[in-house]
Every structure is written in structure tokens, then in C-alpha cells.
Image: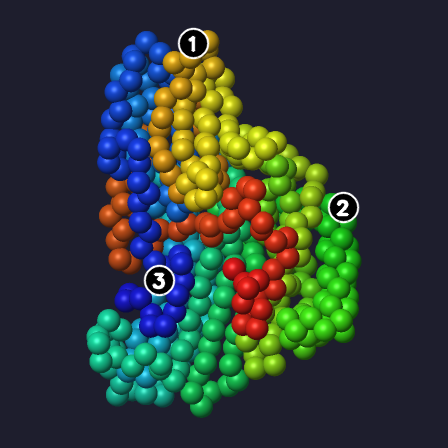
Amino acid sequence: MPRPRGHGSSLLRGLALAALVVSGACADAPRSPTALPAAEFLFAAGDSTYWVRSSGEGMRVRSAPILLTEVDGRLIEVFLSSDGAEYPDASFATVRLWSRALTSRDSTLLFSDSTVLHELAVWRSAHPRELEIDPADEDAPDDPRTVVQDEIEILDVHGPFLTFEHLLNADIEGGRPHQHRGRRYVVDVRTGHLATLDDLLGAADAGRVIAQARASLAQLTDSIRQAGRAGDDRAKAAVETLDSFRFDSTSFGVTDLARDPAIVFMVPGQAPDGEALALYLPPLSVTAPTWWQSVRTTLPEWAADSSRVSWDRDAYEVVATPSADGEALALVLRSRKLTSSKREWPVATVAAPAYQLIALESPPLDSAGRAALARAFDVSTALDGMVQRASRRVRPSRGSAAPTLRLVHRLLSSNSR
């Protein structure tokens, strides 16, 4: 489907390949055959995943705009598909979230919202003579009077659980009042089940986290009101909308703090004109559940001074050093068995931030698994127009001044994402 007009979803844009230090997006880098450690891993950073293979024959690196996670020894890809239609004075666009085990031909629908296609059917019934157009046509109007579109924005993936936000905007000429709403979800990539806190943490921990979140929201709104009374202009604007925020214990996501799990709640609200707003509460640390054990080893471990991030394996270590501006990471492979000074090999320079490293050498990929992974990289690089690759929202690098609270509002643009 053509890209909808006037709708800037980062997940529906083409994802550019990051530049590699080695020559090309798929390249062999010869190294000393006696020293280079045997390693194979997937490294996710920026909006791409890097497939690195190292052996006595050299090093090979591929990159592609693909989102993968590992669950129970299986590699699972997450991707998006789009649907809808464009008319001279109406725009309809919807997106669905899918997963697929690389060794399977079957895909699992993780999330979809029927609102857009329902409104499209109603509109077509009311306008039977209207013909679809190509939104890329230079004569197409930029501001259609009917716009019904939704977005899915992926925030992160931790083993079997994917965190995302769904945003819906519906402005229908002559129809019911505007709809602008959003909320956060966690979905099991294996089944499409929308997970609850009980599913992730157990009932006892879930109840404790919900109580902490409610207290955090109360403290936050009190602080905003006090700032408004003290004369802060931005806080005054925010106070006008505070009563619209309603805590929803099911609108949450999973994040990680120093490789430990945490829960972040999104509290939905509305501006006086119906615009969707959101309060993001500070992350709440939780006791690591059993399923987190396999996730922890994939997460980056930062040095105390934030000068580097690393992943340790039995035979090797992967180290990434941020650039001075924090926008890039210099990735190197280090042998844990050699003591000489020549035990470090450059891999690639990639866009920050670093997300995860999935080791593939233990247990090793079999021939079917490697062929499936190669096919997935080929398809993702080709970027078929009907199937969009999925990427995480790029979050701030370690060491940047990322706020723990964000209020999304057109009047508070300096705090918006």
C-alpha cells in the first residue's frame, strides 16, 4: 500500500543500512587464522541487526533492518504489514504486527485494530462513486477531510515478550467525534497473547507494582500542580489536562535497568480538543522472573564510567565504545584465551544505541537454521513494499540526559519524544 499522506510513522519508513567498518554490508575481513576466536552472534543496534561470524578463516559481517529475538532456542522475526486506501479527500491506513519463527512458513498475528478497516468500509458505502488514487500523485490534496490511521511503535523486545505502543487517529467528516487514543502493550511473540502483569511477574509482584505506580502518578500530578501554582508556564498548560489522565494497569511495557527487569506504565489522557496525551511514569524495578534468566545474557553491560558496553562469552568478549557524540558505536571482538596485545579485532561501526547480542555458537546453528537466517536477511534487505521491517524506537544512549518522565503534548514539545 502507498505510504499515507501527512503521517510520519518511523516504523513505516524504509530503514537504511548502517555503514560497516568492513567493506560493504556483507563482507569478509581476513584476520590471523591462528588468533581470531571462533564466534557467531547477532548484534542489534540502531535500526539494524548485524550477523557476525568469526573463525580461523576470517570474519564475515552482514547487516539488515530486521528485528529478531530468541525464545527457547528459536529465532523469531517481528515484522509489520500495512493495509488501507487513499481517496482524493480521505485517507485510511492501518498496520498489523506479526511474528514468525525463521524455520517456519507460518506467521502469527500479534496485534491488529479493526477500527480503520471498519471505517473504510463505512466510508466506501457512503461514497460508492469515489475512486482510489495514488497518494504519491503531485495533484493529491495534502489535507484530506477524513483521516483514519493507526501506528504501531515497537519499544523493545525481551526474549518472548515484545513491548509496543498503538496509536489511533480518526477524523471523519460529518461523522462521530474525533478519536485520538493510544496505549502500551506487551505481547508474547510465540502466541500473540497480550500479556498481563500477572503473566509476567505473578500475582503478588503484579499487585505491588500497580500500587507503586498509582502512588507515583499521584506524586507526579501533585508536583505538576505545585509547579503550575508557582508560575511555570509549561506546568500551567499541563494542569489543564491532568484530570483527563486515568491510570490503566494494563497499559505498561517491559524495560531493563542495568540488565534487570523493570516496568514502565503509560497513563493515557486527552487534551480539551481530544488530542491523545500520555504520561510515562518512571521505571519500577521488579524481581526477575524465571523467563528473564535467558534474557539477561543478551543485554549490554555498561562500564561504571559509561565508556564502553560489553557482552562476555566463554571464548570471546564483544565490546562497543561510544563515539564522542554518542551517535555511533565502535564494535570489536576480543579473545578471552589470548594474553598477547594482538587479541582485539575491529568488527564494525554501527549506529547507537546497542540493544542485545544473541550468541549463536552454543548450541551452534544447524544448516537449516543458518539457511533460514540467511533468507530472512535477504528478504529484509530487499524491503518488499507490502511487508515492512520492524525496528525498536531508538532510545537514548547510556550517559545521555534521558528524562524518566515524559509528558507528550503539543504545548510541551521540548519534553516530547
**Is 347 placed above or below 195 here?**
above
Q: Which mark is residue 204?
A: 2
Q: Gap in Å between the C-alphas at discs 1 and 2? A: 51 Å
Q: Residues within 10 Å of mark 1 (few under 14, many from 20)?
A: few
Residue at image point 47% right, 15% down: 336
Pointer 2 or 3: first along the chain:
3
Q: Gap in Å between the C-alphas at discs 2 and 3? A: 39 Å
Q: Residue furthest bottom?
A: 174
Residue that carries the numbered disc 1 in the rendered image: 340
> Image quadrant for the N terminus?
bottom left
Residue at image point 46% right, 32% down: 321
Residue at image point 30% right, 13% down: 32
Residue at image point 70% right, 42% down: 286
Q: Residues within 10 Å of mark 2 (few under 14, many from 20)?
A: few
| SS of the residue under disc 3 | strand
Image marks 3 and 1: residues in contact by CB distance under 8 Å: no
Q: How many marks?
A: 3
Q: Say whether residue 90 is left or right of residue 212.
A: left
Q: Which mark is residue 54?
A: none
Q: Say whether residue 82 is left or right of residue 224.
A: left
Where's residue 287, x and y in %?
A: 70, 39
Q: Which mark is residue 82?
A: 3
**Camera-nearest label, 3 or 1:** 1
| SS of the residue under disc 1 | loop
Q: Residues within 10 Å of mark 3 (few under 14, many from 20)?
A: some
Name which quarter of the figure residue 33 lies in: top left
Pointer 1 or 2: first along the chain:
2
Amino acid type shown at disc 2: Ala
Residue 117 seen in render: yes
Image marks 1 and 2: residues in contact by CB distance under 8 Å: no
